[in-house]
Image (tube, grey):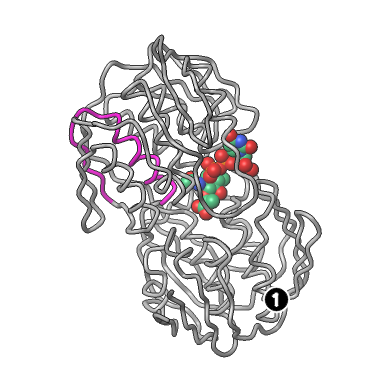
Amino acid sequence: MQRLIIKGGKRLGGELTVQGAKNSALPILAACVLASGEVRLSNIPALSDVYAAIRIMNSLGVKTRFSNGVVTADASDISQVSVEEELMRRMRSSIVFLGAVLARTGECRLSFPGGCELGPRPIDMHLRALRQMGVVINEKHGELICESPHGIRGAVINLPFPSVGATENIMLCAALAEGETVINNAAREPEIDDLGRFLNKMGARVIGGSSGTVRIKGVKKLHGCEYSVMPDRICAATFMSAAAAAGGEIVLNGARAADLGAVNEVFRQAGCIVGEDRDRIFFSARTPPRAVRNITTLPYPGFPTDAQAPVMAMLCKAKGTSVVTETIFSSRFRHVDELARMGADIKTEGRTAVITGADKLYGASVVAPDLRGGAALVCAALAADGESCVSNVELIDRGYERIEKTFAALGADIKRENR
Ligand code: EPU
């Protein structure tokens, strides 16, 4: 068990380079299964979820190497069509291997995925879409046995909600299907566009990126290529939240301001200065933050649910009262009780939280409830007076590469301890 020891109250300052995006890297790693040739991916973050994806790839017979942010993957001799339950349970994103393995081999066996506890996370939209494409799916004892006796065909799929994972799974399956697939009401997150670009580099025919309607013309074969994964917009939002709460000036190299519209708007309302360059953000919080207008999490381009917890940490120190409504997941306020231990004044009712900013937060012993909730506790601890101990760091490591090193480089007093 590891924990972070943080002595808060120091202003942050300096430059950092934003890591590659976890939520882009994971479906792109699954997409490597589609290629009959070697793929070289750069800007891959060293995260426990990425290692979990690589283990799944290895178990399928994909030859992989990972060092210094570069993954090479060769799925020419893919030999397995099933993924063990233990590997599936490690993360939610394991489910996108379903579309990829089906497209490549015509069959797949796996169990329901794991992931952070954010409330029920069904995969009904994924399965309904794949059935529409000719996949026969039998669920037995928690296992999904999927076959395509008459091949996989393109289809027109109308998603009832723009699910990120379902859109990705359909894109992966459609890339090698017969005919054209159209996904209406597709997710528009920038990671969808990144996946489409990567598929096209392998020879796929995907258009529509993040437009809400994605069209995929199936091809017979995909080849190897080189690709660099987009920067992580949620990490960028987290570092800005920390600087807004603790005060300071930071430069985020590699961050794409265009992906952070709704988030940067909130920081500006809070009184922060957000300067945007093409792939750099200059962020300055010279005065304590102010309360902001109501925030409602929504599919992209709305305010991202993944940034809700870190931004809430900033609002705990903002002068005035702010209201945050979470509409994407039913149980994504588990950081609230932990923030309260640090002196935060937050009242929740259902999916709405009312945050009244406190002049001071105090160091405390807190437990990361999930990945982004854990990152929020780190942001609050950096802004708090005194020492905090954040345990369950393993959950934070799912999405942030050595978070203590990033903040230490910005001048924070933070270290990791083994217990
Ligand atoms: N949903 C269904 N049925 C489905 C699929 C989704 O009801 O078949 C519901 C979910 O239960 C949820 C909502 O739709 O209430 C949104 O789910 P979505 O499928 O869009 O999310 P996801 O693909 O499971 C990805 C990210 C999440 C991020 C969400 C929303 C990855 C690996 N995960 O999850 O990231 O919160 O999109 O943007 O890309 C994180 O990084 O901390 C994280 C949780």
Ligand 1 location (quadrant): top right
- Residue 22 in picture, x, y percent from top left: 41, 51
Q: Quadrant of residue 286?
A: bottom right
Which residue, as the protein is rendered here, is positioned at the far front? 141
Q: Position of residue 189 (x, y in %)?
A: 51, 40
Residue found at the very far right of the displayed protein:
349
Image quarter (top left, top right, bottom left or bottom right) of the N terminus:
bottom left
* The magenta segment: 22-42
Which percent across, then down, holds residue 78?
A: 24, 31
223 or 169: nearer the viewer = 169
Residue 51 is inside the magenta segment: no
Q: What residue type is labelled 1?
A: Ala
| Identity of the residue drawn at 32% across and 59% down | 46
Q: How crowded is mark 1: few (under 14 residues within 10 Å), some or many (20 or more)?
A: some
Residue denoted by label 1: 340
Q: Does the magenta stretch include residue 26?
A: yes
